């Protein structure tokens, strides 16, 4: 059975990005970039929604550094607004509800599945109980005034059991969890 990893980068206050700030809030360091380059998930099939597809494919066509690995990866894009053919190579479009499609992908013996961005897609996959691992790299900034795309708004309550952690460049924290969606507060049978 294929495993599904939801993968986020976030400010300490839970934003995916901030107005006027560069990618990675300008805090990416050599250790973190080396880890990304050597990532064991490099052969994973990447799942994304239309908004993330538009953003990342624009980076790829503009020659943004570090996107070559994403261009080479197999990508599945879930959208009701995009149309075939997708311009970014190795990308396949799936319309309709992503939950049954991902459930079917997980049932096979295929490669690891992982998300990139795609907050709505990740939320629906988590709510459906399809997420095996939830990984967050926390950048040491609070973007209360300029932050946008709050990652966890609208998510269900989830218990997270820590399975791995690491510090990069003396400041970035990787936290990896096994998630369990709760039906009530912990200790109440939820």
Image (cartoon, rainbow, N blue to C red):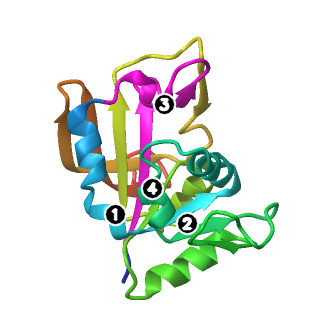
Rate crowding at label 1 as few (under 14), some (14 to 19) or many (20 or more) other CA atoms within 10 Å.
some
Query: Which label sits in the foreground, 1 or 4?
Result: 4
The x and y percentages for residue 108 are 43, 88
Query: Which label sits in the foreground, 3 or 4?
Result: 4
Name the residue furthest top. 145
Name the residue furthest front. 63
Earlier sequence position, callout 3 versus callout 4: 3
Residue under numbered circle 2? 128
Whether the magenta-drawn stretch holds residue 9 is answered as: yes
The answer to whether 99 appears left or right of 41 in the picture is: right
Disc 1 to disc 4, C-alpha distance: 11 Å
Which portion, as a residue range, is magenta?
3-28
Query: Which label sits in the foreground, 2 or 3?
Result: 3
Rendered residue at 46%/67% (across/down): 73
Rate crowding at label 4 as few (under 14), some (14 to 19) or many (20 or more) other CA atoms within 10 Å.
few
The answer to whether 171 appears left or right of 86 in the picture is: left
Task: Say which element carries label 4.
Answer: helix
Residue under numbered circle 3? 23
| Residue 190 visible here | no
Q: Toward the viewer: 150 or 69?
A: 69
Task: Say which element carries label 1.
Answer: helix
Disc 4 to disc 2, C-alpha distance: 32 Å
Earlier sequence position, callout 1 versus callout 2: 1
Residue under numbered circle 4? 68
Earlier sequence position, callout 4 versus callout 2: 4
The x and y percentages for residue 129 are 48, 66
């Amino acid at each position: 059975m294929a495993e599904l990893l939801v993968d986020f980068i976030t400010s300490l206050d839970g934003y995916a990005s901030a107005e006027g700030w560069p990618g990675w809030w300008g805090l990416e360091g050599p250790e973190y970039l080396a880890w990304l380059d050597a990532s064991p998930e490099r052969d994973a099939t990447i799942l994304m929604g239309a908004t993330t597809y538009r953003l990342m494919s624009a980076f790829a066509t503009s020659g943004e550094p570090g996107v070559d690995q994403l261009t080479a990866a197999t990508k599945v894009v879930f959208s009701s607004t995009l149309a075939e053919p997708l311009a970014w190579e190795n990308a396949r479009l799936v319309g309709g509800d992503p939950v049954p499609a991902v459930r079917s992908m997980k049932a096979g013996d295929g490669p690891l599945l992982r998300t990139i961005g795609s907050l709505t897609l990740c939320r629906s996959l988590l709510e459906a109980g399809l997420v095996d691992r939830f990984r967050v790299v926390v950048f040491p900034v609070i973007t209360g005034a300029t932050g946008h795309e709050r990652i966890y708004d609208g998510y269900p309550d989830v218990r997270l059991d820590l399975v791995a952690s690491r510090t990069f460049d003396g400041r970035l924290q990787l936290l990896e969890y096994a998630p369990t969606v709760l039906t009530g507060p912990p200790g109440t049978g939820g």
